[in-house]
Image (cartoon, rainbow, N blue to C red):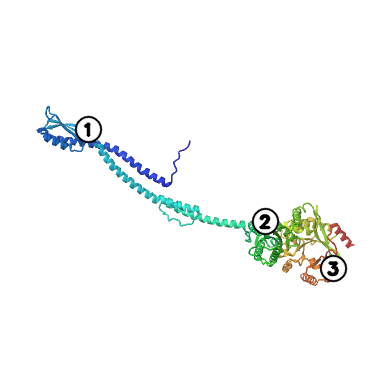
Amino acid sequence: MTAMRWPGLSIRATVLASIVVGVVLPAIVVLALDRHLSQRAQQPIVERNRQAVMVLANAVLTEPAWTLSEPGLRAAMQRVLDEPSVCGIEVLELQPETPPLRMDRCPAGDQIAQLETPVLYEGQRIARLRLAFDGSEIDTALAERRRITAWLVAAQVGFGIAVLAGVLSLRLLRPIDALKRQAGSLAAREPGPLPDWRRDDELGELGHHLGSVQGQIRALIDELETKNAQLERLAMYDHLTGLPNRTLLRELFAHEAARARREQRAMALLFIDLDQFKTVNDQLGHAAGDMLLVAVASRLRTALRESDIACRMGGDEFLVLLPRIDGWQQAAATAERLLQAARQPQPLDGVAEPVRVGASVGVAMFPADGADFDALVRASDVAMYRSKDTGRGRVSLYHPQMDATLRDRLALEREIEAAAPAGQLRLVLQPIVVAPGGRITGAEALVRWQHPQRGLLTPDAFIGIAESTGAIEAIGRWVLDAACAQQAALARRGHTGLHIGVNVSALQLYDPGFADGVRAAMRRHGVAPGALVLELTESTLLADGEGVARVVASLREAGVRLAIDDFGTGYSSLAALKLVRPEWLKIDRSFVRDLPSRADDCALAEAIFGMARALGIGVVAEGVETEAQRDWLVARGGLVQQGFLWSRPVPAAQFEALLAQVEA
C-alpha cells in the first residue's frame, strides 16, 4: 500500500499556507456560524417588533375607526405604513356593507407575513386590522449584519495575517534564511563574519550552535588541510633529510625529460650509495646514522647547482638528476665533486671523533642509457655497483656490459644465503710463524665458498656481498664454529699451544648474543682458554667505548684473546687501543708490500712497532712475500709474520703436513 505523500513545500510556503489556513478558515467558520445563529436569535426580536407595531397601529386607528372618519383613517393607516417593517395595511368591517380600506406597497413574492387584530373601543369591537409585514426584513437585516461582520472579520484576518507574517518573517523566515546562508558558507568553505544571533529563542540558540559548529568545522578543515599538506609532503619528500623522494623525482623527471626531448639535449642521473654506512649504524647507533644522512644530504645540496635535483631513495642511497649538462664529462665532474663532499669528516653530536664515510657513484645518460625514469635508475644503479666492485669511492659510467655484472652480483646475493646451510663453505688456514726459522705458532682461519657452478671462490668475490646483505653473520658463525672444531682437533693430535685467529665483523661483535655464542662454541668443541684469537678491524673500535669494553670483558672471561686486523688502514683510536689492550696488532699488507724500498712505509712500520712495544702489544706482519721483507722486519723486532713467503692459505690436512714438516 502506497502511503499518501504531501506535496513538497518550502518552509516559507508552508508558513504562509499555515497562516492562511489558520486565520482565514476560522473566519469563514465564524461567518457561517454567525449566519445560522444570528437568524435564530433575530426571529424572536422580529416577532416582538411586529406585535409592537400591531399594538401601535391598533391605538392609532381606534379613534378614526370610531368616528368613521375616512381621512383620519387614511392618515392613521399612512402613519402605520411608514413603519419600515410594514408593507401593507387593511382595515376591515368598519360598517356592514362597507368596503375595506387598504394601503399596500408589498413587493411581489411569497415572503409576506400577515397579522390580524380586532380594533376595540371601550371593549367594543369596531373594526378588524390586518397588517402585512415584509418577510425579507430578517434577511435584509441579517445581510447587513453579515456585511458588517464580514468587513470586520476581513479587517481582523488582514491584520492578523500581517501581524503573523511580520512576526514569522522576523522571528522565523529571516533566521532560517540566515541559517541557510551560514550553512551555505560553511558548505562552500567561504570565510565571513558570523551573524549576531539572539540567545532568547530556539532559532537563535540553533544559529549560535551552528556558529560554534562552523568554527569547529573550519578549524577541523584547516587542520585537515594542514595534515593533507603534511601527508602530501610525506608522500613527496623524505621525512628525514627533506629531500624529494623517488615519487616526486619521477614526476620531475617526466617534466624535464619532455623539455629535454623538445630541446634535443641530454640529462644525467647519478646513483649515490654511501660506503660503510652500515658500519656507522651498527657501531654508533641509528640516531648517529640519521644525523649523518642529514649532513650528507645538506652537502649534496650545497655541491649542486640550483637547477639540479637531489633525492633520497631510502637507506643510504641518493639520486641526483642533472637536467642541463653538456655531456658525460660534465656529469662525471659533478659526480667527483659530490664524492669529495661526501668524504669530508663529519662531526656528530654525542660522537667523540668525526665520522668518515665515502660514496660510490653510478652515472647514466638520458636518453642514451635509458628513455624513461625506471630504465635510467636501473642503469645508474648498475654503474654504482660497478663502482663498489672496483674498490668503492669512485665514479662509474654505465655501459651495457655492466648488466651482465649486475646479474651476476644479484645471483650471488641470492645464492650466498644458502651457502652455509648447504655445506658449501670451506675452512682454510694460513700459518703464523716466528721468523727467521719459520716455527708455526698459530694460524688465521679463512673461508672459501665452494660454489656448485663457479667453483672455489675467495673472500674477495663474496664477503662484500655478504656484508651488504647481512649474510655475513651466518658465515661468521660458521667460520667460528669450524675454527673451534679445527683447533680442538689439532690439539687432540698433539699440536698443543697453537692459536687460531678468526675474523669478526662489526655486525657480529655488536650482536648481544655474540659473546655467549663464542663461549658456547669453545665449550662445545673443548677449546682451551687462549687458543682462540678474535681479529677485529679498526673501525669496530670507533664505536661506543663502553660498549666495546663490555664486549671485550665478556670475551676475555671466556678465555678469548684479541687482535686488531689490518692495523693502520682505518681511523685508529689510540684511546680505544689502550682501553681494549689487544694481544696482537696485525700490520696491514699495504705497509709491508714495499718494504724495505719505500722510506715512508719503513717509517710507518717502525712507528707501529714502537707504539706496540710501548703498550705491551705483540705485532704480526701480514703479507710477507719476499725474503727482503722478512729480513727487514726481523731486524726491527718483527719476528711474528704471515704471508705467501711462508705459506698460502691451505686446507686443514695440508696445514697439519706443514706442522709435521716444521716440527721434524
Tell me the kind of residue under disc 3.
Answer: Arg
The residue beneath circle 1 is 113
Relative to 602, residue 248 above or below = above
The residue beneath circle 3 is 630
Tell me the kind of residue under disc 1.
Answer: Ala
Report x, y in % for residue 178. 44, 52
Relative to 512, residue 49 above or below = above
Q: Quadrant of the C terminus?
A: bottom right
* Residue 223 marker: none
Toward the front, the furthest residue is 263
Q: Is residue 99 left or right of residue 321?
A: left
Q: Distance of mark 2 from mark 3, alpha carbons?
A: 56 Å
Report x, y in % for residue 367. 69, 57
Relative to 645, residue 211 above or below = above
Question: Taking the image as drawn, is residue 527 in sight?
Answer: no
The residue beneath circle 2 is 373
Q: Is residue 43 left or right of residue 411?
A: left
Report x, y in % for residue 617. 78, 68
For the residue pair 99 and 447, the one nearer the viewer reads as 99
